[in-house]
Amino acid sequence: MIKEKLALVPMLPGCYLMKNKEGTIIYVGKAKLLKNRLKSYFNGRVVGKTKKLVSEIVDFDYIITSSELEAFILEINLIKKYDPKYNILLKDDKSYPYIEFKNERYPSLVVRREINVQKKNKMLFGPYPNAHAARRLVNLINRLYPLKKCDKMPKKECLYYHIGECLGYCIHKDIDTTDLRNEIISILNGHDEILINKINEKIKVNSDNLNYEVALELKKELDYIKVVFEKQKVELNDGINRDIFNYYVENGYISIVVFFLRNGKLQGNKKNIFPLVDDVKEALEYYIVNFYSKKNIAPKEIIVPEELDIELLNSVILGKVVTISKGKKKHLLDLAKTNAKINLENNIEMIYRDNDRSYEAVKSLGKLIGIPNLSVIESFDNSNLFGSFTVSGMVVFVDGVKSTKDYRKFKISKEQNDDVASMKEVIYRRYQKVLLNKSRVPDLILVDGGVNQINACNEVLDSLNLKIKVCGLLKDDKHTLSSLVDGDTLETYSIDKKSNVFYLLTRISDEVHRFTINYHRQIRSKGSLSSVLDNIEGIGEVRKKELLKKYGSLKKIKEASVSELESVLPLKTAVNLKEYLDGMKDL
C-alpha cells in the first residue's frame, strides 16, 4: 500500500502525516519536495528513533502547499492539533521568568513567568534561565529602593514605609520617582556598577549606625551579585538583546544550546538533548520557531548557524534572524556549539542507558499483556482524608518516559471514602473529554488496585464505547509493587523485582502517587484555610476569597507579616488572624 501511494506523491512542497495501524497520526513533517522526503523514510537506511517511527507507519497522508513557508506554518499548526508522539522537539514548551518593571505613577518590580507583551506601562527584562537569581535580584532592588510594595493602594502607610523601603505612596501623592526609575532601569539594562555602589552605600550607612547584622546581610548579597556578574564576562558591549542558537549531532541525537545575551552580556543558557527523527536543518528550525511561539519573547537579534533557512525563519519569527561568519559574534556562535558538544558527550551514556532500559521495559510489558506496540500509558491514583478533600491524579508515560505536560488533576465532586466511585467518576470525566476533543487515546490504563478498580474502569469505558486495555497494580504489605492484574483476563502476573518491567511500573506508580498526594495537600490546605478563616471576626466571604487568592495556604499566611496582611485586611483583623495562626502549632 505504501509503495503504491509513494509512486503518486508529487514533487511539490507540502506537509505529510504518518499514521500507525490504529490510524493515529504519530508524526507530522514538511518538505520542499514531498516525494523525495517521503521516499527517504522507506529506503531501508534509517536508524535510531527514525527507524522506530518507520516500524510503526502503516499509512500516510499529505497536503500540498504553494510554498515551503506555507508548509512550515501548516506543519506547526498540525503538530499543535494532533500532538504526534514523535514530534519531540516541538513539545519542549518551557518558559523562563522575566523581571517586569511597572512603569506607572508609583513604580514596582516583580518576577513574571506568565507574561502579556501587549500590556501597557511595563518593561520586561530577561529571560532569566535561573529563576532563583531573578527573584533574588528583584528582592534586593526592592530592599535598596523605596518602590511600591503593595498590590493595591492601602488607606494608610505600612511597615515598609516605616523601615524606609517605601516612600508612602498611599499618603504622599506627589512623589517624584524619576531618579529612582532611571537607576533601576539602568541596573536592569546591565549597569552593574550602579547596584554595587548602592549596596556599598547601604553597608556603610548601616555599619555607621551599628546595624552590623543588616550590614552583614548586605555584604552577602554583594558577594552573590559579584559572582553573578562575574559569570557574565562574555559580552559584546553593544547593549543589544540577542539569542544565539547552535547545535551538535552524534549517534542519532541532537544537542541544542541557546545563549541569552541581554544588553550585550551573557545572562544564561538553555540546553536540550533530543533523539533526531528528521534531518538536522529542519529539526533546528522547528525548535527555534517553537521556542518563540510559546511564552518567550524574541529579542532584537537571533543568531543561528548558516545552514538554516534565514528567509524562512524571518517570515515566521518577529525578531531579526541572522547568521554570522566572523568577529566576536561568530566566536559566541562557535562557543554555543562547543557547549552543545560537551553537553551531549557528558550525558549520552546516561541517555542511552535510560532509553534502552525504558524501551526494553515497555517492549516487555507490552509482550506480557498482549499490546505489541505499547507506547502511551496513563496511570490514575486517588487520595482523600477520611472521605474529605477527595482528588485523583493522572500521569502519562510515553515510551517509558514521563510526559508531564499531559498530567491531569481531578477534584472529585462528592466527598466520599469510596475508591471505586471515585475511579468511575475520574475515568468517565477523562475519557469523555478525550472523545469530545478527539484527543490521543492511550494504549494502556494503569489503576492503583485490584479487581474492583479494574471493573469500575472497564464499566465506564464500555459505556463510552472505548476499548482500552486496563491493568491494576498490586502492592505487598510493605507497599512495594508485587504484581500486575490483567484487566481482560483478571490473570495476576508476579513481577520480578530485578526486571525492567518492575523498574518501569514502580516509576509510574511512585510518580502518580507523588503527583496525586501533592495535589491533595494543596486542596486540603485551601479547604483548611477556608475553615480557619471562618473563626476570625471581620473576615467574610470577600476577604476570604482575597486571602485564598493571594496566599493559597495557611502556611503562607502564617509566614506573612501583619503589614503584608494589611494589603487585604484592616489592621485589627490582620493582628487577630496573625495571633490565631501563631497559636496553631501544627502548621
Image: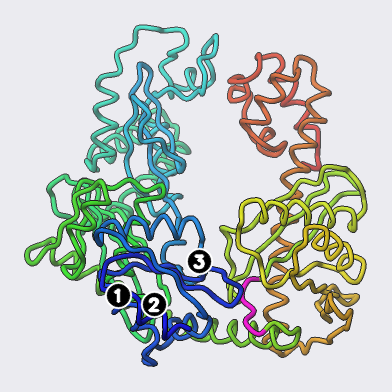
Judge the density around disc 2: few (<14), some (14-19), many (≥20) Cα neighbours within 10 Å. Answer: many
Q: Residue at the spot x=83%, y=79% of the render? A: 486
Name the spot of residue 495 as percent of width and height, x first: 79, 86
Using the image as rendered, state which of residue 369 and residue 152 is in the foreground: 369
Q: Are marks 1 and 2 in contact (CB under 8 Å)?
A: yes
Circle 2 — which element? loop
Judge the density around disc 3: few (<14), some (14-19), many (≥20) Cα neighbours within 10 Å. Answer: many
Report the mark closest to the observer, 2 or 3.
Answer: 3
Give the overall secondary structure of the magenta segment.
loop
Above or below, comparing residue 75 to residue 587 in the picture = below
Q: Amino acid at mark 2?
A: Leu
- Quadrant placement of the C terminus: top right
Q: Which residue is mark 2?
A: 276
Q: Residue at the spot x=75%, y=64% of the render? A: 466
Q: Which residue is mark 3?
A: 84
Q: Are marks 1 and 3 in contact (CB under 8 Å)?
A: no
Name the spot of residue 39 as percent of width and height, x first: 34, 83
Q: Earlier in the sequence, mark 1 or mark 3?
A: 3
Above or below, comparing residue 456 to residue 414 in the picture = below
Judge the density around disc 1: few (<14), some (14-19), many (≥20) Cα neighbours within 10 Å. Answer: some
Residue 450 highlighted magenta (yes or no): no
Which label sits on residue 280? 1
Real-space Cα separation, disc 1 to disc 2, in angstroms: 8 Å
Circle 1 — which element? helix
Real-space Cα separation, disc 2 to disc 3, in angstroms: 15 Å
Report if residue 390 is visible in the image.
yes
Q: Quadrant of residue 527?
A: top right
From which residue to which does the magenta span run?
372-376
Real-space Cα separation, disc 1 to disc 3, in angstroms: 19 Å
Q: Amino acid at mark 1?
A: Val
Using the image as rendered, state which of residue 583 and residue 453 is in the foreground: 453
